[in-house]
Image (cartoon, helix red, strand yellow):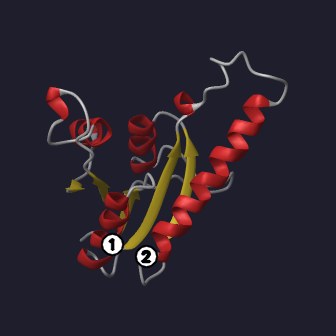
Amino acid sequence: MVKRILVAVDGSAEAVEALTFAATEWPDADLTALHVINPADSTTGAEGGFPGAVDQWYDSATQRGERILREATDAVDRAVDTRLEVGRPTATILAVANGEKAVGDDAEPAPFDHVVLASQGRTGLSRVLLGSVAEGVVRRAEMPVTVVR
């Protein structure tokens, strides 16, 4: 029986559909929406940066992530926990799913029973049907993964 589901959300309409799917498919499970801030998206290094550029980028990325989580969870008519993490998306989704990252200092890490995420087939021949993050999670996850297309 599925008790805890992790749903990765990236701000796309497909990710909101994945969260809606999880809420409908597993109505009794605890849902957690996860957004990952990817440091590779920062352009501060390429610009040479100015004092505080990294902090400004992080603050902006955090605000954007919080907005993405709020909009995604507002689309679902039930309680959904949220997580905002920083890291490479595939590795971070897997770490959270495996319970390797605890929410707070006193929180006990707990693995999720299932991962749900949207497919994003945008580039590359090997990724025509599955996005690179989705593909990486499917290949390396230790629990069942549902990819919503």
- Measured along the vertical axis of the image, is residue 20 above or below residue 125? below
Picture quarter with the N terminus: bottom left
Residue 102 picture location, percent across and down: 57, 50
Residue 125 vs residue 118: left or right?
left
Q: Residue furthest front?
A: 47
Residue 145 vs residue 44: left or right?
left
Label 2 element class: loop
Label 1 element class: helix
Residue 33 vs residue 136: left or right?
right
Picture quarter with the C terminus: bottom left
Query: Which residue in the structure is indicated by mark 1?
Result: 20
Which image quadrant is residue 78 in?
A: bottom left
Residue 11 picture location, percent across and down: 45, 55
- Crowd class of label 2 (few under 14; some 14 to 19; many from 20; radius 10 Å): few
Residue 60 picture location, percent across and down: 68, 46
User: Is there CB contact under 8 Å for labels 1 and 2?
Assistant: yes
Which image quadrant is residue 139 in?
A: top left
- Measured along the vertical axis of the image, is residue 89 above or below residue 54? below
Number of the label disc, if any, that sits on residue 88: none
Amino acid carrying mark 2 in the image: Ala
Amino acid carrying mark 1 in the image: Thr
Number of the label disc, if any, that sits on residue 75: 2
Tell me which label, 1 or 2, sits earlier in the chain: 1
Q: Residue furthest bottom?
A: 77
Asked whether the viewer can see residue 135, the reply is: yes
Asked whether the viewer can see residue 80, the reply is: no
Residue 53 picture location, percent across and down: 76, 30
Which residue lies at the image location 69% right of the left edge and 37% below the top edge? 57
- Crowd class of label 1 (few under 14; some 14 to 19; many from 20; radius 10 Å): some
